[in-house]
Amino acid sequence: MANTKHQDSVISETRTAKPKPPSMYKVILLNDDYTPMEFVVEVIQRFFGKTREQATQIMLKVHTEGAGVCGVYPHGIAETKMNQVMNYAQQHQHPLQCVMEIA
Ligand code: TYC
């Protein structure tokens, strides 16, 4: 870490620091014409810890606007949730798509 007694090392560490990736990511569901509304509500409850009421609101937003945010997480957790949704949808043979983007 930076040592305030040695300005040179502070400057040097600052200049050589690698840029960090953005820390938080939105996990987003995309609309399609085939996945049943009930399945989407169940997915949002199961993987994003929402109540049935919250999940229904998010599903309807996706249905009417084309996309909706289910949650915001650090990179690794967002990636895991996205993959869990995609695997679960595939297992049930629904074309539901889930993506992540910088928050
Ligand atoms: N549009 C779908 C239907 O009418 C419902 C749906 C909602 C699908 C949200 C995907 O992420 C989605 N059955």
Image (spheres, rainbow, N blue to C red):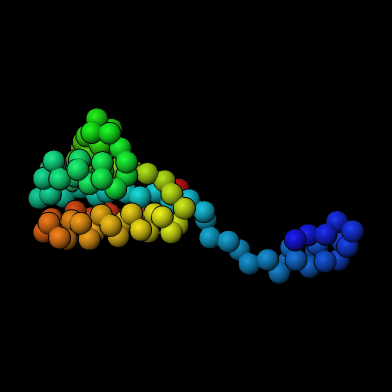
Residue 82 sits in quarter: bottom left
Residue appearing at x 53%, y 60% in the figure: 21
Residue appearing at x 81%, y 62% in the figure: 10
Total numbered badges shown on the rendered structure: 0
x, y percent for residue 101: 40, 54
Residue appearing at x 47%, y 53% in the figure: 74
Q: Is residue 66 visible?
A: no
Residue appearing at x 75%, y 61% in the figure: 1
Q: Left or right: 33 with respect to 10? A: left
Outermost right residue: 5
Above or below — where is 60 with respect to 31? Answer: above
Above or below — where is 87 with respect to 51? Answer: below
Splitting the image into four quadrants, where does ligand 1 fall?
top left
Q: Is residue 93 visible?
A: yes
x, y percent for residue 37: 14, 41
Q: Left or right: 12 with respect to 83? A: right
Residue 99 sits in quarter: bottom left
**Along the line of sight, the residue nearer the viewer: 94 or 34:** 94
Outermost top residue: 53
Q: Left or right: 35 with respect to 81? A: left
x, y percent for residue 89: 18, 56
